[in-house]
Amino acid sequence: MRIDHSRIKPTFELEAAELQLGRWPVAGIDEAGRGPWAGPVVAAAVILDPANIPDGIDDSKALDEDGRDIIYRRIVASGAIIATGIADVGRIDRDNILQATFWAMAEAFRALTRTPRLAIVDGNRAPRLGCETRTIVKGDAKCLSIAAASIVAKVTRDRMMIALEREYPGYGFARHKGYGTPEHKDALSRLGVCAIHRRSFRPVQLALGLVDELA
């Protein structure tokens, strides 16, 4: 597990203040997979148990794959309330990636077994949810609940992409998870576009010959 001790870690300060004021539960919401050329976008909503917060929760980007898996298991075992929403490629291409992300966030929120009093969402925009909502830019690096959601979303999506590698072999989905790596670009050139590629994304449109590279 990679840990950067020089970086400021996310804290439970915002959530603790809300708890002290009697405004609980608080859910952190984040997503994984807005940028890739292939696969779904996954959102997660997490309500941590204030009495049993797992050690090591951090922004998912600050952890390596093994570290995320370890913390994911700790979050699940801690009694946290967890839910996910998954927007598939069809929804992404039909609605655009932002709206598909908002839909996935709302699905995750609705799937929680307790209704939050407050939802804190990573970023500067959020979908309409059934409670007060606040957005926090780089919230996954600031708020523990959002950081936990970032880990749940990332691990969930990575596991989906590993499974999809077996269904669509040769693209390297288990390694690059659908992101635009040189390996992925080469696979598109060799194998063409498969069913889980996002046809609304320019690199995929280029592979399909739908747009000109110089346009």
Image (cartoon, helix red, strand yellow):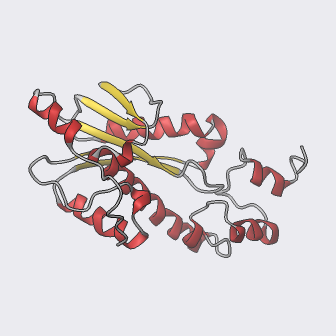
Residue 82 is situated, as x and y percent measured from the top left of the image, at 28, 49
Residue 6 at x, y = what percent? 34, 60
Image quadrant for the N terminus? bottom left
Residue 9 image offset from top left, x and y in percent: 30, 53
- The residue located at (71%, 61%) in the rendering is 194
Residue positioned 36% across, 64% down in the render: 4
**Rendered view: 176 above or below 76:** below
How many numbered callouts? 0
Left or right of 157: which side holds 193?
right
- Report whether residue 193 is seen: yes
Q: Quadrant of the C terminus?
A: top right
Q: Residue furthest front?
A: 6
Residue at x 30% of width, y 69% of height:
70
Q: Is residue 130 visible?
A: no
In this rendering, the answer to whether 147 lies above or below 177 is: above
- Looking at the image, residue 121 sits to the left or right of residue 51; the answer is right
Residue 99 on image: x %, y %: 55, 34
Give the side of residue 200 with respect to residue 121, left or right: right
Which quadrant of the figure has residue 200? top right
